[in-house]
Image: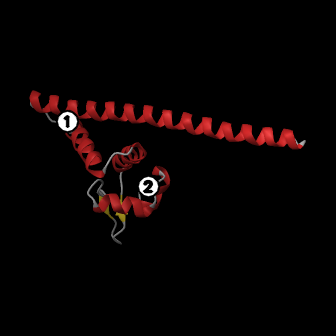
């Protein structure tokens, strides 16, 4: 599929996808005869992982590190036990970091909702004292 379809499916801009290509996070699987980037389902899945990591504050280097570990684990080849353990430990570390960041975001969201509720209450009180609904 071409970059426009990938952008629509991943909810990433063309510019962002090109940036991830420039940084080596994703590489189009092929090029058309006209030179257009062509992507596979695996490329879309990779971009989806990146899109999910971004709001959690993971850096490009962290994204690259996780993707490299997952690529090695999914390569289908037999890995030496020590390397497999190291890769699984890396993925586990990212999973734990993601869980912590999600918890932190939930706390921030709760505080933001409390703040909005406080403002609504002030507006209600002001409206009540002014005699307006």
User: Could you tell which of marks 1 and 2 lies nearer the N-terminus?
Assistant: 2
Residue at the image position 50 percent from the left and 37 percent from the top: 108
Classify the position of the N terminus by image quarter. bottom left
Q: Distance between the Cα atoms at labels 1 and 2?
A: 26 Å
Residue at the image position 34 percent from the left and 66 percent from the top: 32
Q: Residues within 10 Å of mark 1 (few under 14, many from 20)?
A: few
Residue on which disc 1 sits: 76
Q: Is residue 79 visible?
A: no
Q: Position of residue 133 (x, y in %)?
A: 87, 41
Residue toward you, 87 or 32: 87
Circle on res. 6: 2
Q: Position of residue 5 (x, y in %)?
A: 47, 57
Position of residue 6 in the picture relative to residue 109 (left or right): left
Q: Residues within 10 Å of mark 2 (few under 14, many from 20)?
A: many
The chosen color scheme is secondary structure
Q: Quadrant of residue 122?
A: top right
Q: Position of residue 25 (x, y in %)?
A: 29, 53
């Amino acid at each position: 599929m071409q970059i426009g379809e990938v952008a629509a499916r991943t909810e990433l801009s063309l510019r962002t996808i090109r940036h991830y290509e420039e940084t080596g996070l994703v590489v189009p699987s092929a090029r058309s005869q006209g030179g257009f980037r062509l992507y596979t389902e695996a490329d879309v899945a990779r971009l989806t992982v990146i899109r999910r990591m971004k709001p959690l504050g993971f850096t490009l280097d962290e994204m690259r590190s996780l993707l490299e570990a997952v690529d090695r684990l999914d390569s289908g080849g037999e890995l030496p036990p020590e390397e497999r353990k190291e890769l699984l430990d890396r993925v586990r570390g990212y999973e734990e970091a993601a869980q912590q960041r999600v918890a932190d975001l939930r706390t921030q969201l709760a505080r933001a909702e409390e703040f909005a509720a406080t403002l609504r209450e002030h507006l209600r009180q002001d409206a009540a004292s002014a005699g307006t609904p």
